[in-house]
């Protein structure tokens, strides 16, 4: 098997293999997404700790064979705890305000923590390396199994 050093080499190798077992894509994507999940939980602001507990990893529905995408997102089952309704009846979503910021009653803007965005941006190289490493392991295992 040819030497694979980066994401581009891995993509070319997958194209050469043709129909790649779905497990190769899944294992690599999950391993990379787990790094982002841990970083998001680590960097999430803590008041009661519900925000950290509410961050989950969810696999998106597969649209193309050989492709897997994971979302680091807020758990929809916890929406009752995250949705706040003011006395005036205005609805706000607590995780969004912590991510993007909010405007105080006096009109001052408070910037958000960007904990979800930074979980990917700050770890991009580490995520890419983990995806490539895991995908190579899975592809070599699948290749040997043929």
Image (cartoon, rainbow, N blue to C red):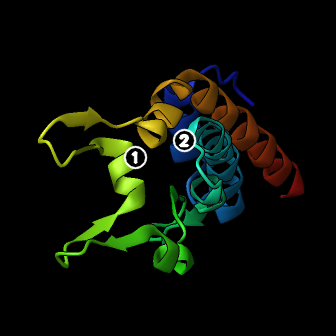
Task: Label 2, secondary structure: give it.
Answer: loop
| Viewer-closest of 56 and 133 | 56
State the residue at coordinates (71%, 61%): 23
Q: Quadrant of residue 106?
A: top left
Label 1 Cα crowd, 10 Å radius (few <14 / some 14-19 / many 20+)? some
Q: How far is the residue under mark 1 from the one under mark 2?
A: 8 Å
Q: Read off the residue under disc 1.
A: 98
Residue 138 position (above or below residue 67): above
**Sooner in the amino-acid sequence: mark 1 or mark 2:** 2
Q: Quadrant of residue 36?
A: top right
Q: Are marks 1 and 2 in contact (CB under 8 Å)?
A: yes
Q: Read off the residue under disc 2.
A: 45
State the residue at coordinates (54%, 59%): 68
Q: Is residue 6 left or right of residue 87?
A: right
Query: Which percent across, then down, holds residue 29?
Result: 61, 49
| Viewer-closest of 84 and 23 | 84
Task: Label 1, secondary structure: give it.
Answer: helix
Q: Quadrant of residue 140?
A: top right
Residue 38 position (above or below residue 67): above
Query: Which percent across, then down, holds residue 5?
Result: 64, 19
Residue 57 position (above or below residue 104): below
State the residue at coordinates (66%, 37%): 42
Q: For the N terminus, give its image quadrant.
A: top right
């Amino acid at each position: 098997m040819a030497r694979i050093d980066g994401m581009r080499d891995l993509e070319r190798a997958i194209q050469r293999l043709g129909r790649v077992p779905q497990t190769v894509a899944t294992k690599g994507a999950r391993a990379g997404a787990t790094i982002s999940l841990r970083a998001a939980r680590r960097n999430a602001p803590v008041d009661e700790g519900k925000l950290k507990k509410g961050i989950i990893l969810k696999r998106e529905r597969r649209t193309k064979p050989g492709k897997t995408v994971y979302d680091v997102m807020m758990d929809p089952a916890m929406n009752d705890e995250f949705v706040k309704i003011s006395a005036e009846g205005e609805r706000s979503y607590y995780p969004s305000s912590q991510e993007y910021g909010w405007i105080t009653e006096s009109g001052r803007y408070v910037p958000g923590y960007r904990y979800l965005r930074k979980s990917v941006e700050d770890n991009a190289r580490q995520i890419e390396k983990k995806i490539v490493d895991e995908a190579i392991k899975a592809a070599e295992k699948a290749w040997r199994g043929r």
